Amino acid sequence: MRKILIPCDSSDNALRAVRYAASVTKYFSDVQLELLYVHDPMQLREYADLLKQNAEHNRQVIETNRILQPAKQILDTAGVPYQIRWRVGSPANEIAQHVYETHCDAIIMGTRGLSAVATVMIGSVATKVIHLVEVPVTLIK
C-alpha cells in the first residue's frame, strides 16, 4: 500500500492540496492518506506550567482535530480513507522526520506561493521539505 502524506494547517492552500489528494486517490485502491499537523512548540510552552503531560497530550489531540476538521470533511465527503497524525516542532523538520519514520511514499502539500525574493529571504516550509526528503513532493498553489 502506498502512503501519501498531506501536511495540513487548514489554510486555503493546504485544503486545495487535500482536495487534490482526494481526487487522485479515488482512482487507486492501494493508497493511504495521512493528514499531518505540526504544532508550534512556542505555543505549547505557554501552557507547560498549567498542564500536566497527559492533559497537554489531550490538548494537542483536540487542537489537531480542530485544525484538521475542514480537511477531514473534504476527505469524508469524498469517501477517501485517511489517518490523522500530529507532531510538535519545526514544520519542515517534523514533516521530513515523519516521512522517514512512517515510510511515506510521497507528499502532497500546499504552498503559500511566496515571491522568489521572499523565499530566498525567509524560505518556506515547502522549499525546506523538498530539500530534506527523498520522496516525490507535489506542491499545490
Image: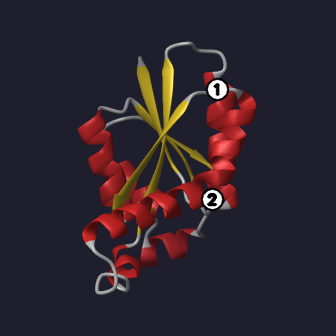
Residue 58's tag is none
Q: Is residue 53 left or right of residue 120?
A: left
Residue 25 location, quadrant: top right
Name the residue rendered at 64%, 26% in the picture: 24
Label 2 SS: loop
Whether residue 16 appears in this view of the structure is: yes
Residue highlighted by disc 2: 10
Q: Residues within 10 Å of mark 2 (few under 14, many from 20)?
A: some
Q: Amino acid at mark 1?
A: Val
Q: Residue 59, how many percent across, how many down?
A: 43, 67
Q: Which residue is mark 1?
A: 24
In the picture, measured across the screen, residue 5 lies left or right of residue 53, that is: right
Where is residue 65 drawn, in percent x and y?
55, 55
Residue 64 sits above or below residue 103 on the image: below
Point out the frontmost of discs 2 and 1: 2
> Which of the pair 26/45 is nearer the observer?
45
Measure the alpha-carbon separation of dots 2 and 1. Answer: 19 Å
Q: In which quadrant will I find the N terminus?
A: top left
